[in-house]
């Protein structure tokens, strides 16, 4: 089963005043990883999702959601 993921990472990152590269460095991944997550190409691991939410001072649910059926 394939799920489409609603990704709100970009808006939260921009609201925090961070570039993709800055956020990537702070959570220990590449800028390309942040880009692919923001574009819905890559679904982050639980650890990465938790790290992103912690750095952006929000919940995982603020960043990612499954679409309504």
Image: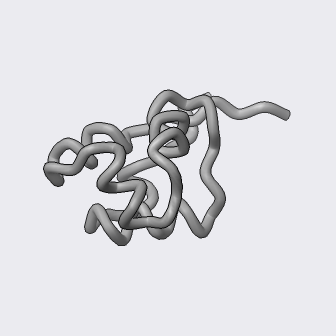
Residue drawn at point x = 36 percent, y = 52 percent: 62
Rendered image coloring scheme: one colour
Q: Where does residue 38 sit, x and y in percent of width and height? A: 45, 35
68 to 26, vertically: above or below: above
Front residue of 41 and 23: 23
Classify residue 1 by image quadrant: top right
Q: How many marks?
A: 0
Q: Is residue 1 left or right of residue 62?
A: right
Residue drawn at point x = 40 percent, y = 49 percent: 63
6 to 43, vertically: above or below: above
Q: Which quadrant holds the C terminus?
A: top right
Q: Is residue 43 left or right of residue 24?
A: right
Q: Where does residue 57 sit, x and y in percent of width and height? A: 26, 67
Q: Is residue 4 left or right of residue 38?
A: right
56 to 37, vertically: above or below: below
Front residue of 27 and 43: 27
Q: Where does residue 36 sit, x and y in percent of width and height? A: 54, 34
Residue drawn at point x = 26 percent, y = 44 percent: 19
């Amino acid at each position: 089963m394939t799920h489409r993921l609603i990704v709100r990472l970009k808006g939260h990152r921009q609201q925090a005043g961070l570039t993709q590269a800055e956020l990537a460095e702070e959570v220990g991944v590449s800028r390309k990883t942040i880009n692919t997550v923001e574009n819905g190409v890559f679904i982050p691991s639980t650890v990465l999702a938790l790290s992103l939410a912690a750095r952006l001072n929000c919940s995982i649910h603020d960043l990612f959601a499954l679409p309504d059926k």
